[in-house]
Image (cartoon, grey):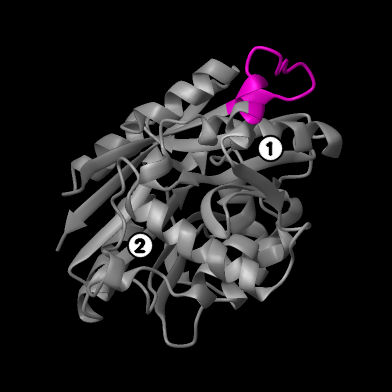
């Protein structure tokens, strides 16, 4: 196959099409454009596309480092159109991106591929990447979910003195900042965490943009558990795609409060909201080593739909 590599140049429609061919959650060209526009001014990135002589975009590479990321760490998105795989496109894009990373102080590259994509896994491991962890995605059919066997968990937790409320019940900057601190603490302490150390964790503004950007958040779908005034657990729903589905972006409970059905109660409350919202389904992602949360999902009837392998290469 004949193609050339050139810099990315307003190829949002073409790249959105490439991404939608391999990712379960669709993205529109406008949403992709908005996401790229939010890239911080003090970050660095390299974007390129592979183009055929007729102008078809058949591959895309985007590698970047943001200020909140660990020094030397770059993230890479590398996509080839399905009918153009195994024809040197990804190899050529990586050959352009990797030297650029090294020239900009990069010491390692991270990326993610479907865990059942043998071509992508073979490509990555054959070029020095190693698998750090596997993230599983699962799906719950909302209209048919019966909470009856698990509903007592909500009352049991409430009777222990824990109260539940939503961001819609208690809007404002103070709530969101307390939510950030809870999110950060529980995320750093979650099984399978492979992210940044505490001193390099994303600051509030970056976290807020990642979670609340593009109007993905529904205030009633941000459910918080509190012991007195202390936030001790949360689950956060985001809108996803064009079918009305909801994505559980995060569920976390402080370590000293785990084992008391709080996470189960939060997830049950989130399904109640999803039913009221009219969502046909809910999706969530969990690290394959996070046995407690996977057990809750299985108990509730979530079914695995896909998995993602996180890979890393030291330069």
Nearest the viewer among 4 and 17 is 17
Q: Can you tell which quarter of the image residue 33 is in?
A: bottom right
Which residue ends up furthest to the top in the rendered image? 149
Disc 1 to disc 2: CB gap under 8 Å: no
Q: Is residue 54 above or below residue 163?
A: below
Q: What's the magenta region? A: 139-155
| Left or right: residue 240 compared with residue 194 | right
Residue 295 locus on image (x, y percent): 44, 22
Residue 147 spot, x, y in % from top left: 70, 18
Taking the magenta stretch, the answer to whether it contains residue 190 is: no
The location of residue 81, given as percent across then percent down, is: 51, 45
Instruction: Judge whether residue 238 can be spotted in this image.
Output: no
Q: Is residue 306 left or right of residue 310?
A: right
Circle 2 crowding by C-alpha within 10 Å: few under 14, some 14–19, many from 20 = some
Camera-side residue: 18 or 265?
265
Q: Who's the residue at 53% across and 35% down the image? A: 262
Q: Quadrant of residue 75?
A: bottom left
Q: CA distance from mark 1 to mark 2?
A: 31 Å
Q: Residue at x 71, y 32 (%)?
A: 271
Count of marks, rendered view: 2
- State the image quarter where residue 172 is shown: bottom right
* Residue at the (31%, 72%) spot, across then down: 200
For mark 2, what is the residue? Answer: 75
> Which numbered tag is attached to residue 270?
1
Pair 1/2: label in front = 1
Q: Secondary structure at mark 1?
A: helix
| Percent coordinates x, y for residue 37 in the rendering | 61, 77
Residue 85 to residue 30: above or below: above
């Amino acid at each position: 196959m004949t193609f050339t590599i050139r810099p990315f140049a307003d190829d949002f429609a073409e790249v959105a099409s490439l991404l939608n061919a391999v990712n379960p959650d669709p993205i529109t060209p406008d949403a992709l454009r908005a996401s790229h526009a939010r890239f911080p001014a003090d970050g660095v990135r390299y974007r390129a596309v592979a183009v055929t002589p007729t102008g078809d975009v058949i591959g895309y590479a985007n590698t970047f480092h943001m200020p909140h990321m660990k020094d030397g760490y770059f993230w890479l998105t590398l996509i080839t159109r399905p009918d153009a795989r195994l024809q040197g496109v990804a190899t050529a894009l990586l050959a352009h991106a990797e030297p650029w990373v090294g020239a900009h102080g990069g010491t390692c590259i991270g990326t993610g591929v479907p865990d059942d994509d043998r071509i992508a896994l073979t490509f990555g491991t054959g070029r020095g990447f190693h698998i750090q962890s596997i993230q599983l995605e699962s799906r719950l059919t909302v209209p048919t979910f019966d909470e009856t066997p698990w509903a007592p968990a909500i009352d049991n937790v409430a009777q222990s003195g824990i109260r539940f409320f939503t961001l819609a019940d208690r809007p404002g900057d103070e709530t969101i900042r307390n939510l950030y601190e809870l999110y950060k603490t529980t995320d750093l302490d979650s099984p399978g965490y492979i992210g940044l150390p505490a001193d390099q964790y994303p600051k509030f503004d970056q976290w807020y943009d990642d979670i609340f950007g593009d109007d993905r958040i529904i205030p009633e779908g941000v459910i918080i558990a509190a012991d007195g005034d202390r936030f001790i657990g949360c689950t956060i729903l985001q809108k996803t795609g064009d079918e009305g589905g909801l994505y559980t972006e995060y569920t976390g409970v402080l370590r000293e409060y785990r084992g008391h059905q709080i996470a189960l109660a939060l997830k049950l409350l989130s399904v109640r909201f999803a039913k009221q919202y009219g969502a046909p389904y809910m999706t969530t992602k969990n690290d394959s080593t996070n046995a407690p949360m996977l057990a809750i999902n299985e108990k509730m009837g979530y079914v695995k739909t896909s998995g993602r392998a996180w890979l890393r290469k030291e330069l």
